[in-house]
Image (spheres, helix red, strand yellow):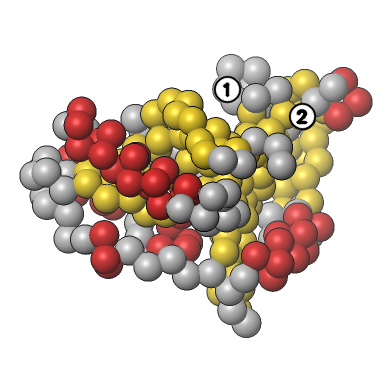
Amino acid sequence: AAPRHVEVQILADQHGTALHLGDRDCSVQRRHQKIVEEAPALPTSPPDSRDRMQQAAVELARQIGYTGAGTVEFLAYDGGYAFLEMNTRLQVEHPVTELITGIDLVEQMIRVAAGEKLALTQADVKLKGWAVESRIYAEDPVRGFLPSTGRLTRYQPPPEGHADGITVRNDTGVYEGGEISIHYDPMIAKLVTHAGDRLTAIDAQARALDSFVIDGIR
């Protein structure tokens, strides 16, 4: 099987506690830029690779005295894994981890920065269901997906909320009538769906994407 981009979300406080919040798969990329992420990551081979990656991420945080939220990224392949890098910040794809754990990562970062001890232990971290995130970009597919600037004449995201076991969440900072500038990243939204299993979460994501209305002028 082809190698996959797997990352482990960690949290660590100033009092020596470090733990992980599961993993994410970020293998769907274009020009080394992530497009679709999901959590948890698909099983790795051999079966204990996932556990070893997660523990390696936690041990790395302990060894360097890291505090706050962070992401340790790996290349996972049949037979093992290799360390890629550590991002000492909150990742764009953190909502998928929040949805499968029920833990607000931004809140935890603020509490840790204020000197509080983590109220969580590793045993408290329970993964529930599956989450999928699509990054919504202002790009022009005709021009090789180059960033596309201009005014958003229509911006109508799908309804957010929880119903029938499915959660839809849209993190964004744009609005209808607003301007997409050349001075910023072309990502305009993060559409996330969560359900009890992977296929249901994917189906919910597809329906949400179908109902997303975006149009603009250059």
The reply to whether callout 2 and callout 1 are in contact (CB within 8 Å) is: no
Does the rendering let one see residue 110? no
In the picture shown, does residue 18 fall above or below 125?
Answer: above
Specify whether residue 77 is in view.
Answer: yes
Q: What residue is disc 2 on?
A: 139
Quarter the C terminus occupies: top right
What x and y, as percent, mark residue 8? 42, 44
**Residue in the image at 22% along x and 46% along y:** 18
| Residue under numbered circle 1 | 184
Vertical position of residue 139 compared to residue 26: above or below: above
Q: Amino acid at mark 2?
A: Glu
Most foreground residue, 46 or 41? 46
Q: Is residue 1 left or right of residue 169?
A: right
Element under disc 1: loop
Q: Quadrant of residue 59?
A: top left
Residue type at mark 1: give it. Answer: Tyr
x 48%, y 62%: residue: 99
| For marks 2 and 1 on the same chain, the one whose residue lies earlier in the sequence | 2
The quadrant holding residue 118 is: bottom left
Where residue 45 sits: x, y (%)?
Answer: 57, 49
Q: Residue at x 57, y 22 (%)?
A: 184
Task: Left or right? Give the position of 24 relative to 8.
Answer: right
